[in-house]
Each structure stands twice: as C-alpha cells, then as structure tokens.
C-alpha cells in the first residue's frame, strides 16, 4: 500500500502544496464547469423562468453540500491531525463514523424535502412562474441526496490521508458524467446547440439538470467504493468500526460544523437575496444566479488551493511542526493572491461576453454585468481568507473557522443586505457581498496573527518546562 502521508512530512513545501492543491484545484475547475453546465444548458431553452428556478432551488442543493462538508471536512481535518499525532488506528473509527452518520442524516432531510418541497420553495423565493420548474428540480436532488452527500463526504475523507489525486479523480469522473448527460436530459430533439440541431434529447429542462447531477454523483460514489474495496486506503468503511465515543463526535463536529454552517449560510444568504431581488423581477434573480456562477471560477480555484493544503496544515499542527506549517500557509497565500488577481483582470475586460454566454436576454445581461463587477472586486484578496479559514480547520480551531463562516455569509453579509437595500436599493444588494468580503479578510488576518502568537508562547513554554 502506497504511503500517501509522505507528502505531509518529506516533500519540500512548494512540491507538497502543489501535490495536494493541484488535484483539488482541478477538481474545483471541473466542479465549476459542471455547475455552469446546468445554468448554461438550461439557459439554452431561452426560458428565464427555468434559469430562475435553478437559482431558487440552489440554496436547497447547498443544504446537502453542507451535510457532506459537516462530516467530510470535519473528518478530513481530524484524520490529518491524528496522523500527525501517530494515531493511525483512530482514523479508521473516524472515517466509519463520518460515512454512516452522514448517510443517515442525508436520508432524513431528503424525506422532509420530498414531502414539503413546494412550501419550502415558495419560502425561499420561488414565484408562481418558476415554482413548477423548481419543484421538479428539487424532487430529483432530494431523491439522490444520499449519493450527493456520500460523494462530497468521501472525497474529503480520503484527502485527509493525503490521497489528493484519488479524491480528485472520484469527483471529476462524476462531474464529467454530469456534463455529458446535461444536454441529453435538458434539451429536446430538434433543439439548437452551438448552431447545430440536436438529433436526440429527452427535453426535461431543469428536471433533466437535476437527474444528470444525481447520476454523476452515483458514479463518484461507485469510484470511491472501489477505492476502498481495492485496499488502497488506510481508512475504513467497516460498520463494526463505527463509534462516536473517545472524542470522535466532538472532533468531527467542532471543525465540520463551521464548514457546514458556511454552506447553510450560503443557502440562507441566497434565499434572502433572491427574496430581495424578487421585487426587481425574475430577470434580476436569473442575472444574480448567472453572475454568481461566473464568479465561481475565482472562488473555486482559491477554495481548491485552500482545501488542498488543509490536511498538510493539520498534519504539521498535530506533529507540532509549526515552522513548516507557517511556511506552507504563507506560500499558499501568495499563490491565491496571484490566481485571484489574474482572473479578476480577465473578467473585468470580458464581463458582457461572460454573462451573455449563458443567456440571450438583454435585461439579464445588463443586470449581470453590474453584479459580476461587484463580486469580482474582492477577488484578488479573498483567497487569503480562504487559506486562513481552511488552516484553522486543519488546526482544529473550530471557533475561529466558525466566526469567518458566520461573518462572510451571515453575521456581516445579511445585515449589509438589509441596510444597503434600504439605502441604495438594487445597487446595495449588488455590493453587499464584496463589502462583507473585505471586512472578513481583515478579520481573518487579525485572528491568524493572534493564533500564531499563542502557538509561539506555547512553544516557548514547552521549551522552558523541558529545561
């Protein structure tokens, strides 16, 4: 069995960061394409109500992502720290607990969404024109929820043992299947795509987008299952290993909760902004959905790098190799700044073309250009906060990670939505997110410096006791 943990301890920092981050970033890139594919192919129907339906239902889809991250990110950080501490047997219990608890929770919420999907969709901003489409989309997403959650959760868990490549492959395979199936399920026979008339297609619209998403996640789960069954992992999916005792529950939830809360607050913030935007029409909702999809390029690349180094930070923290940990974090910050600045410049010069590539609706494009400009204003520096947040998760600093998650999507962002909407209307809604981003970037740097100072004092104290 290949020892994936050598990347944590033996590789030079640039090589270690590249080994862990590049697969994660590539996976995020494919994730962007597959997320954009839903909006793009639904947009080819020319129906703004269907594009709006995807935007409205997205917060509920993010809810299942939150469950996956609760046990996936929490488990990943706990696994890498335990490896750094030399507790290899404990990680088998951690992985088994995460997998089976995550599946059970996803099934419970899937049943609730299936039973009450129309009232829930009206609550999150669906209009009479989009409710039917949104209901169809949510039906299939809820039906496939255990696979969606398992795919995200398992991909994160095996990152914790250093198997970044395998994690990326599992996610990418499922996403590619989704992308290929999207036009087949969404568009109908005779529809036009890239100037060609399709000879086949099921024509299911937004429901087809959801079906393709579920099938892609099923393929990912099958890949991860084969990875475990081939004996490639030091983790365990054996039910007999399941246990929440010995600090397992607390260790997973303390870090997983902030990651999950971030997704939940993304859902809540999307719900709130859709409710505000509904006063400006379905075109405004559709435009924000498209702008946020486009903005995902810089966000996902930076998140991919930050997510990739999380196990490295966790391992170094567990092994008390703080010098290597700090150097890894600093190098990763510089990489994220370069990525953010590059994408921001490209987007600013091609805003109209980017938005127009999704849908040929002049009003949606007009709104979307303004929205993308605002969202990209924090692009160059936002990655610094992501690095710090994922580093906190790797260290097991649940409170600090929780604060940043609550701040960017809730504590700071949501009040800004209300205040700025009352003061300057639509323009206020558009600029609320970047305003919250800048506040959280500054807060993250202050918190990171505080944590480093405490580590230095702790290290000095240990040296004094040894003397």
Image (tube, rainbow, N blue to C red):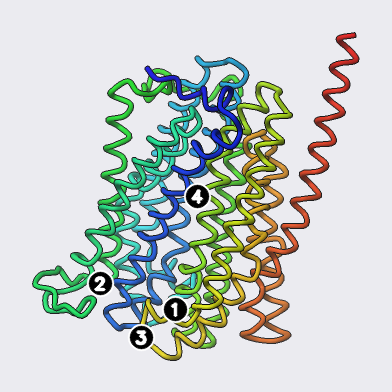
x and y percentages locating residue 358 in the rendered image? 37, 76
The residue at which mark 3 appears reads as 360
Q: Nearer the viewer, residue 196 or 72?
A: 196
- Nearer-N-terminus badge (1/3): 1
Dot 4 corresponds to which residue? 66
**Mark 2 or mark 4, earlier in chain:** 4
Q: CA distance from mark 1 to mark 3?
A: 9 Å
Q: Is residue 180 above or below residue 21?
A: below
- In the foreground, 346 or 276: 346
Identify the residue at horizontal 33%, vertical 35% (top origin): 224
Q: Earlier in the sequence, mark 1 or mark 4?
A: 4
In front: label 1 or label 4:
1
Measured Cα–Cα span from mark 1 to mark 4: 28 Å
SS at mark 2 in the image: helix
- The correct choice, above or below, for 48 with respect to 173 in the image is below
Give the CA distance from mark 2 to mark 4. Answer: 26 Å
Callout 1 secondary element: helix
Measure how far apart labels 2 and 3 are at the Cα level: 17 Å
223 vs 421: above or below: above
Residues marked 1 and 2 touching at CB (< 8 Å): no
10 Å crowding of disc 3: few (<14), some (14-19), many (20+): some
Q: Mark 1 — residue?
A: 355
Q: Which mark is residue 205?
A: 2
């Amino acid at each position: 069995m290949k020892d994936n943990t050598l990347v944590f301890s033996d590789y030079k920092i640039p090589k270690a960061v590249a080994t862990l981050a590049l697969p994660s970033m590539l996976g995020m890139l494919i994730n962007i394409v597959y997320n954009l594919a839903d909006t793009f192919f639904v947009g080819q129907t020319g129906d703004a109500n269907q594009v709006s339906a995807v935007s409205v239902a997205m917060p509920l889809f993010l809810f299942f992502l939150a469950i996956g991250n609760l046990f996936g990110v929490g488990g990943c950080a706990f696994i890498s720290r335990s490896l750094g501490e030399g507790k290899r047997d404990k990680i088998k219990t951690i992985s088994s607990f995460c997998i089976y608890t995550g599946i059970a929770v996803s099934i419970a919420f899937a049943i609730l969404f299936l039973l009450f999907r129309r009232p829930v969709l009206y609550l999150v901003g669906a209009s009479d024109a989009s409710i039917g489409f949104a209901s169809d989309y949510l039906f299939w997403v809820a039906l496939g929820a255990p696979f969606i959650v398992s795919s995200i959760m398992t991909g994160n868990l095996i990152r914790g043992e250093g198997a970044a490549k395998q994690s990326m492959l599992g996610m990418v395979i499922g996403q590619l299947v989704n992308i290929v199936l999207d036009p087949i399920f969404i568009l109908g026979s005779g529809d036009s795509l890239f100037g060609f008339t399709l000879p086949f297609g099921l024509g299911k619209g937004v429901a087809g987008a959801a079906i393709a998403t579920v099938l892609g996640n099923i393929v990912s789960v099958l890949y991860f299952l084969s990875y475990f069954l081939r004996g490639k992992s030091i983790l365990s999916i054996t039910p007999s290993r399941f246990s929440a005792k010995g600090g397992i529950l607390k260790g997973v939830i303390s870090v997983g909760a902030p990651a999950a809360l971030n997704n939940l607050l993304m859902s809540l913030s999307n719900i709130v902004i859709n409710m505000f935007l509904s006063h400006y029409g379905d075109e405004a909702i559709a435009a924000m959905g498209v702008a946020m999809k486009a903005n995902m390029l810089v966000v996902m690349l930076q998140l991919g790098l930050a997510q990739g180094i999380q196990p490295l930070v966790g391992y170094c923290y567990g092994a008390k190799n703080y010098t290597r940990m700090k150097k890894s974090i600093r190098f990763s910050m510089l990489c994220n700044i370069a990525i953010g600045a590059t994408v921001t410049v490209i987007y600013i010069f091609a805003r109209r073309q980017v938005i127009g590539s999704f849908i040929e609706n002049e009003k949606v494009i007009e709104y979307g250009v303004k929205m993308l400009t605002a969202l990209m204003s924090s692009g160059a520096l936002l990655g610094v906060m992501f690095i710090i947040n994922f580093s906190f998760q790797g260290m097991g600093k649940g409170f600090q990670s929780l604060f940043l998650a609550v701040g960017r999507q809730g504590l700071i962002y949501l009040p800004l939505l209300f205040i700025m909407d009352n003061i300057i209307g639509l323009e206020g809604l558009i600029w609320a997110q970047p305003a919250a981003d800048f506040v959280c970037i500054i807060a993250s740097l202050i918190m990171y410096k505080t944590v480093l100072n405490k580590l230095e004092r702790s290290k000095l104290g240990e040296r004094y006791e040894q003397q």
